[in-house]
Image (spheres, rainbow, N blue to C red):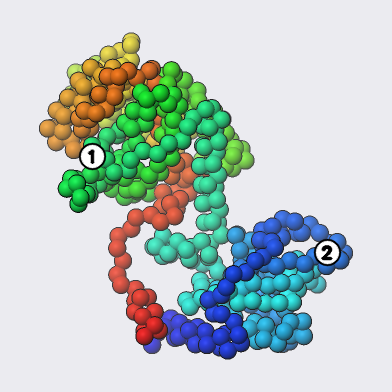
Amino acid sequence: MSLEDGLFEQRVARISEIEALGYLPFGKRFDFTHTVPEILSDYSEKTAEQLVPEIRVTVAGRVQTKRPMGKAGFMHIQQNGGKLQLYIRKDGVPERDYALFGLLDLGDIVGAEGYLFRTRTGELSLHVEKLEFLSKTLLAMPEKFHGLEDVETRYRQRYLDLIANQEVRGVFVTRAKIIASIRRQLESRGFIEVETPMLQAIYGGAAARPFVTHHNTLDIDLYMRIAPELYLKRLIVGGFDRVYEINRNFRNEGISTRHNPEFTMVEFYQAYTDYKGLMDFSEELLRQLAIDATGGTSVPFGDQTLDFSVLRRITMRQAVVEYWDGDGGPTMDNVRDPEWLISATGKATAGEALAHLFEVHAERKLIQPTVVYEFPIEISPLANNNPDDPAMVDRFEIFIAGMEIGNAFTELNNPIEQRRRFDAQLDMRERGDDEAHQMDEDYLRAMSYGMPPTAGEGLGIDRLTMLLTNSQSIRDVILFPLLRPEGEIGMADKLRRLGG
């Protein structure tokens, strides 16, 4: 028997001892008067004298440390990210409660009632007068509730990561603040939150490879959505002038520190504006987002300090010229010349060539929050034409720390031009581009009823959370990231033996 199995068996044996004292080993309802963080917030500044007369509280939490000392003892419980010391005396609680204290393992969940005081060392503590058992833990906690550093274990067993590493909890609290800030800012500007299908007969709204599934009753293949864009724009046609959706998207692509096949975005669409209007709005939104999430607009990320107070604005052509690697960089005339672009890259079109050069030379160097605008028409089939340059569209992307975190454009609302763009995408698919858009006949029909001038934007919430929590991997900001299947861990067999 391994040491781990031996500890498991010992803890299982404790169940009968706890039951013999009259407790339920897996607990019952327990009403507490305060959370641990509330106690720390309300009473941490009070002196011993100010805690008299007695301030009575009832709390619950997970046992983090335990120090028996003869006829008394101390333990810390952890709840909601806060830690509180409990003091228990043999002559201060019922006999069975003190016996229960002796049976507790680290990780067990308990409830306690008593009054607050300060110990000789000045630590705010609860003097326990009643102890209740709420749930038995059968597996050993990480040593002293810290030191869970194995990345594989942290991602696979996020529940254990959250118990052991309190800074991880803080990341996801910040993520919640980010989403709340986005909702609050959009709704204060009159946007309505909606829901659109995640299973789609025709996928669209982005250039990506979808996941395919099958609906048995209808006997048709369906796709997990890669973006909600085309449905949200149908709502613009229907008269919802400002709509947004915080949505899960699915793209059947690689996994990296910046990519997870399942990810979260917010997409919003506003009628009667254009991409320049969304540039201004994005600057305001990101500035307030940083303040709401971190308390200010200067945010550390790796060895950089990011300034969210302003968005630099630069065209894609300017970015290629400015950030070119090596000698003999191009001029603005070069990057406007289709023949030069194609010869420099070997791409089929000038637009694809310009986008390739931007990705190779400029993208990773855009550290401070930057808007890159004026994109080639070949890679932007849903964006409106630039009136001054037929090769470009009115589109921008937002880059921070070398990552794309947002994409926006003035929406193409001409159904005749949209059909032509879809045809061009079909040609790209025939050349082997399996990420090109499909033809969506119903979307064309919706556009033919008249879409007002509109601009739309998508922001990646996972990557925004990375930036605002100084997290270097997207897996650190997704509670349950996708991982390769692991081998059989044997937990089911252990529990099956106990159940007979």
Q: Is residue 206 left or right of residue 257?
A: left
Q: Amino acid at mark 1?
A: Ala
At numbered mark 2, what does the secondary structure look like: helix, strand or loop?
Answer: helix
Q: In the rendered image of this protein, does residue 105 appear above or below residue 376?
A: below
Q: Label 2 belongs to which residue?
A: 51
Q: Position of residue 32 (x, y in %)?
A: 67, 65
Q: Quadrant of residue 220?
A: top left
Q: Position of residue 175 (x, y in %)?
A: 51, 47
Q: Position of residue 261 (x, y in %)?
A: 32, 48
Of callouts 1 and 2, the N-terminal one: 2
Q: Which residue is mark 1?
A: 201
Left or right: where 233 falls relative to 160: left
Query: Closer to the camera: disc 1 or disc 2?
Result: 1
Which of the 4 image quarters holds residue 39?
bottom right
Query: Which residue lies most toward the front here?
Result: 217
Name the amino acid, label 2. Leu
Q: Residue at x 33, y 10 (%)?
A: 388
